[in-house]
Image: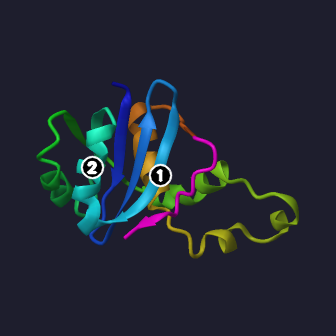
Amino acid sequence: MCKCISIDPGKWKCGLVIADIIKKKVDKALVIESELFEDYIKNLNTFEDISKIIIGNGTSSGDIREKLNFFKREIVIFEEKNTTFRAKARYFELFPIKGLKFLIPREVFIINKNLDAISALIILEDYCKMKFTLKESIDTKTWLK
C-alpha cells in the first residue's frame, strides 16, 4: 500500500491528487465539486489500494473529514498555508512555458486556470518532504461535475 490521496478542501470544490509514494509519481490530479467528493472517494476506494488521505487544514477541512468517516485507514490533517499562492509557481515547474510564449508575462497563462489540484500536490509534497512528478500528461484543471 503506497498510494495516498491529498486534498485541498474548499466549500464549492476540492483539489485532489492520487499519488504513488514509492514512485514519487502523481497518477491522477483533478478538481471536483465538493458535493460529489464523498461518492468519488468511495468509488475510488473500491478499486485503488489507498493507504492514507492527507487533507489541507483550510476552508471546509472539517466538513471533508466528516465525509470520510467510511475510510478506515489513516487520515491526516496537514498545514496548507499559502498553497494556492505557491501553486502558481509550481504550475510553471510542471508546465514550463516554451517557445515565443516565454516573452508573454507568466500571469497571463494562469488567469483562468484552476490550481486546486496543484495546491493538493503541494500539500502532499510538504507532508512527504519530497517533490513528485506527474504521470505522463495530466490535466490538473479537470473538473468532475
Please give the residue where the numbered disc 1 appears in the rendered image: 29
- The picture places residue 13, in percent across and down from the top left corner, at 34, 67
Viewer-proximal residue among 93 and 4: 4
Look at the numbered discs 1 and 2 and tell me whether their residues touch, using CB distance below 8 Å: no
Q: Specify start and end residues of the magenta stretch as a single range.
A: 135-145
Who's the residue at 67% across and 54% down the image?
95
Decide whether residue 143 is among the magenta residues.
yes
N-terminal label among 1 and 2: 1
Q: CA distance from mark 1 to mark 2?
A: 16 Å
Q: Quadrant of residue 129?
A: top left
Q: Residue at x 68, y 74 (%)?
A: 108
Describe residue 52's horizontal placement relative to residue 62 as left or right.
right
Residue 54 is at least partly visible in this image: no
Mark 1: give few (<14), some (14-19) or many (20+) Cα within 10 Å. many
Q: Residue furthest front?
A: 47
The residue positioned 14% from the left and 36% from the top of the image is 72
Report whether 95 appears left or right of 59: right
Residue lying farthest to the right in this orientation: 100
Q: Residue at x 26, y 41 (%)?
A: 46
